[in-house]
Image (spheres, rainbow, N blue to C red):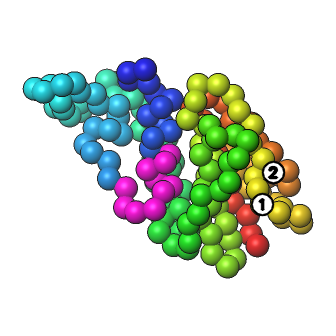
Amino acid sequence: MREDLARAKLIHAILLTFNGTPCIYYGDEIGLTGGMDPGCRKCMVWEEEKQNTELLNEIKALIHLRKEERLLANDGEFKFLDTAGNENIVAYQKYNEKRSVVILINPTDFQQSFTLPVDLKGRTLTDLRTKETTQVGKFELGGYQYKILAFNH
């Protein structure tokens, strides 16, 4: 469980898509670890070959999405989506009168499916990370994975 890259990515996805101003403590972006006092925070690792570039690139991509899609920042309204029947999924929507962004989070280590409780008739969903489009509102999420989906009203 410790130093789990998939969980670290998931935590940053939540941090960078939720309301408020995200705060990334130095070294989090490269997977810097620590322990109990006095080792609660190590010195910054500056050698790139010792940094977790996969985590760094994931966080850079999320920051780019947050800048590109204003609803991922603090624009618009926020609401949690009904996950009845699948309590292990976390789902929330950020929206305004013209557009919605839905974030689906699987905080478990097993695959889950989730159907958006949103009428998608005549709408196309775009996965903001992969740029893939669909008109189907049912999604499969692997363990510790997330999706960021957008559609126009």
> Which residue lies at the image location 62% right of the left edge and 50% below the top edge?
91
User: Most extreme residue toward the front, as rendered?
Assistant: 84
Residue position marked by numbered label 1 in the rendering: 118
Q: Residue at x 38, y 23 (%)?
A: 3
Give, as a three-letter code, the residue at label 2. Gly
Label 2, label 1: how many angstroms apart (C-alpha)? 8 Å
Q: Where does the image place residue 138, in percent across and percent down from the top left?
A: 80, 45
Which residue is at a point 32% across and 48% down the rendered structure image? 24
Judged by depth in the image, the label closer to the viewer, 2 or 1, is: 1
In the foreground, 56 or 109? 109
* Residue 62 image point, x, y percent: 50, 50
| Residue stretch in magenta | 13-22
Quarter of the figure with the N terminus: top left
- Asked whether, in this view, residue 100 is left or right of residue 74, the answer is right
Question: Which residue shows up at 51% across the image and 29% down it?
Answer: 6
Q: Which amino acid, by three-letter code, is at mark 1? A: Val
Residue 123 shown left or right of residue 13 in the figure: right
Residue 137 numbered tag: 2
